[in-house]
Each structure stands twice: as structure tokens, then as C-alpha cells.
Amino acid sequence: MGNLFVVSGPSGSGKSTLCALAADMDKKIKISVSATTRAPRGEEKNGVEYFFLSNEQFDEKLAEGDFYEYANVFGNRYGTLKSHVDSLTARGFDVILEIDYQGAYQVRDKNKEAYLIFVMPPSYEELKKRLTDRHTESEEQLNIRLAKASSEMEERVNYDKVIINDSLPDALGELLSIIESKRN
Ligand code: 5GP
């Protein structure tokens, strides 16, 4: 059985890049694909970044009991599909759930072995720059994400480990060594 890792951090902390690189470097790591009701952004494809569901489809999965956890983030629903994650860990993969803190605590309640990692941007200024440079949000969305980032970052004290994403190679090295250290 593979292990379960949760990676959280504000939008723009660089957690997606970090997780994607970790999975590239180590073929025993898989990133869970979440379901969401938000619309695809840019080049995002169904089944790759997310399973994009309508509100009705999300409700159906809820009724079927197929969510490990779910949460409302920025007015959209996001959730981890149990069937998806369980099949990966059963095949021996270490699975990363890239989810927000509300989901992280639900996962910890269900699975005490889950290891929670919080990714911090090096500074508020850098966070703002990364979000602005991404050009994927409207100005209103950007301001909402920035405002939420500060309160979100206070949640880091409840995590098992905080990684500061200042130097990408260093942060990646830290993430990979945590995952390796949990293997038997
Ligand atoms: P984004 O819209 O930028 O892709 O994601 C917004 C937020 O939703 C991020 O903080 C991300 O961690 C969170 N998120 C993505 N997937 C899930 C999920 O399956 N469950 C929960 N609880 N949060 C998620």
C-alpha cells in the first residue's frame, strides 16, 4: 500500500509546480485528480488537472458517497474521489492530494496516517507577483485569492511540515525526502 500526503498552500505558493515535479522525478508518486465545479482555466483538460463536473454531477457523486473529502473554495466545490485515490494506493503508489485546509482536516480525521504538508510562498509580495503574472484570473478573482491567502497561511501551524518555496530545487528536495522517508 502506498502512503497518503496532503499538500496545501495559498494559490500562487507554487504547490502545483512542486507536486508535478515530484511526480516527474519519482514514478512511485501520483497526484490525485480532484473533481471540481469550477470552469476549466486556460489549457486545462478534463481528467488531467481536474474532473470538471456540473453541480448536478457533483451532487450525484456526493449521494453515491464517492468523496473522501470536499470543500467550498472561492464559491466552487472541490472534492477528492475515493474510488480514484484508493485504486492508486492499492497499486502501491504514494498519492499526493493537492487540497485546501478544510479538506486536509477531513482527510486527517479519516486517516491518521495521512501526512500534511503546507507550502508557503517566500513573501506576500512574491505571492502577489506570481498570481498577477499568471494572468488566469479576473482582477476581482485575483483580489479574492490574495485576501484569502493571508488567512489561509495561518492554518500552517496545524500541518505536520511547512515547506517554504523560495528556491524550487530546495523545496522539491524537501518534499521528495519526506515522501521517501515514509516508505518501508
Ligand atoms: P484552483 O481553482 O486554483 O485550481 O484551486 C483552488 C483551491 O482549491 C486550492 O487551494 C486547492 O488546493 C483547492 N482544491 C483543489 N482540489 C481540491 C479538492 O479535491 N478538495 C479540496 N478540499 N480542495 C481542493
Image (tube, rainbow, N blue to C red):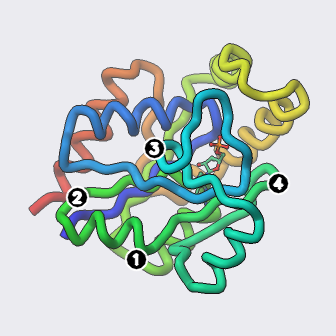
User: Residues under labels 1 and 4: Cα distance?
Assistant: 27 Å
Horizontal side of residue 172 vs 51, given as left or right: left
* Amino acid type, callout 3: Val
Residue 174 spot, x, y in % from top left: 30, 36
Dots 4 and 3: beta carbons under 8 Å?
no
Q: Which residue is mark 1?
A: 111
Query: Are dots 1 and 3 in contact, CB under 8 Å?
Result: no
Q: Is mark 1 within 8 Å of ligand 1?
A: no
Q: Is residue 32 above or below residue 150?
A: below
The amino acid sitting under disc 2 is: Phe
Q: Earlier in the sequence, mark 3 or mark 2?
A: 2
Q: Earlier in the sequence, mark 2 or mark 4?
A: 4
* Residue 164 coordinates in the image, percent (x, y): 47, 32
Q: Nearer the viewer, residue 54 or 93?
A: 54
Image quarter of residue 58: bottom right
Q: Residue at x 58, y 59 (%)?
A: 35
Sequence-wise, which precedes: disc 1 or disc 3? Answer: 1
Q: Is residue 145 above or below residue 112?
A: above
Q: In the current view of this chain or complex, which residue is farthest to the left? A: 184
**Element type at mark 4:** loop
Q: Residue 95 got which mark?
A: none
| Residue at 55% from the left image edge and 40% from the top image edge | 45
Q: Quadrant of the C terminus?
A: bottom left
Name the spot of residue 56 as percent of width and height, x first.
Answer: 75, 70
For residue 93, which numbered disc appears in the image? 2
Disc 1 marks which amino acid?
Asn
Location of residue 69 in the rendering, given as x and y in whole percent from the top left corner: 57, 71
Where disc 1 sits, the SS reads loop
- Nearest-to-viewer mark from 1 and 2: 2
Relative to the observer, which residue lies in front, 91 or 145? 91
Question: What separation in Å lies between label 1 and label 2 (alpha carbons)?
Answer: 16 Å
- According to the picture, the residue beneath numbered tag 3 turns out to be 162
